[in-house]
Amino acid sequence: MENNKLLQIMDLCVTYKTQEGLVHAVNNLNLEISDKETLGFVGETGAGKTTTAMAIMRLIPCPPGKIEKGKIFFEGEDLLKISDRKMRKIQGKDISMIFQDPMTSLNPVMRISEQIMEMILLHKKINKKEAYAEACKLLELVGIKKERADDYPHQFSGGMKQRVVIAISLACSPKLIIADEPTTALDVTIQAQVLSLMKDLKDEFGTSMILITHDLGVVAEICDKVAIMYAGSVVEYASKEKLYLNPSHPYTKGLFNSIPKLDTDEEFLEEIDGLPPEPTDVISGCAFNPRCPYCMERCEKEKPGITYLDKEHYVCCFLYENK
């Protein structure tokens, strides 16, 4: 593993056993993130983004899920090889996760202060009084008055609940935060406030972040690097500037073409033909080939490897193999 990489995922494969058959949720995924960097993780529903996040946290339910192979290096150590006890020390302290729905992330019968204190007391050697004071500070940091510390989750709005979840994720100053579509359940105005808060706190704490989303506008706002995921694999990875100025994979191009543009008068938006493959489908060639306008014969039989367009921009597509 490279020394400057905080997290590096290599050839990760995750499957789930279901009544319909074996689901290949993540297929030979490669990904990396550096210190104090924000990575946007983009893809359609079912692409494998959340499964990847759960694999990093070692929270894949087994059964039915199983990490078939791969390596997940965090600060030079393979998370898939360490003991459960050591992993529990990392969860919440060094790597924390903000889940999709703040409504279900909080315990409805515990006071807000108790839920923040629970994380603090788990990883810090301090007493309850000190933990309570820290919990109040964290609430004020995310824009909630400390007087609300002893309220219950049902007394908070959706936006405030998400702020509480962010406070819990920051409780132990983690080195990496995984935010799984943190604004999905919120209205547009509150979304903007929460994203702005996350960006400010990330900079203040010097934390790296993986932001899982399907919104390219959100990525443009706060991310440094972008990974485009399709059918369980990263098909394109680049800096935000390079990806937005030079989208290369046919799927990435399709995503950008489907976004309304303010500077042109378009009657219809371009769409990507067809649908993503079913989770149980066994695909022999490129997963995108049935929908790809540039599909060649070899695309139906072979899986494309990684082709580097430059040092920090790669794409998995035969179109670029000999360029």
Image (cartoon, helix red, strand yellow):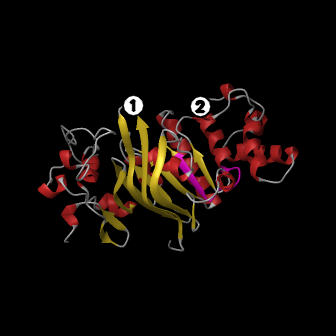
Mark 2 vs 1: CB contact within 8 A = no
Q: Is residue 230 left or right of residue 38?
A: left
State the residue at coordinates (61%, 35%). 105
Residue 168 lies, with reference to residue 315, above or below; the image says above
- Residue occupied by mark 1: 19
Residue placed most toward the observer, 260 or 301: 301
Callout 1 amino acid: Gln
**Residue 259 magenta:** no
How many residues crowd around disc 2 within 10 Å: few (fewer than 14), some, or many (20 or more)? few
Which range is magenta?
Answer: 170-179
Secondary structure, mark 1, is: loop
State the residue at coordinates (83%, 54%). 125
- Residue occupied by mark 2: 104
Which of the two discs, 2 and 1, labels the residue nearer the N terminus?
A: 1
Callout 2 amino acid: Thr
How far from the left and from the top, in percent, is residue 242? 34, 64
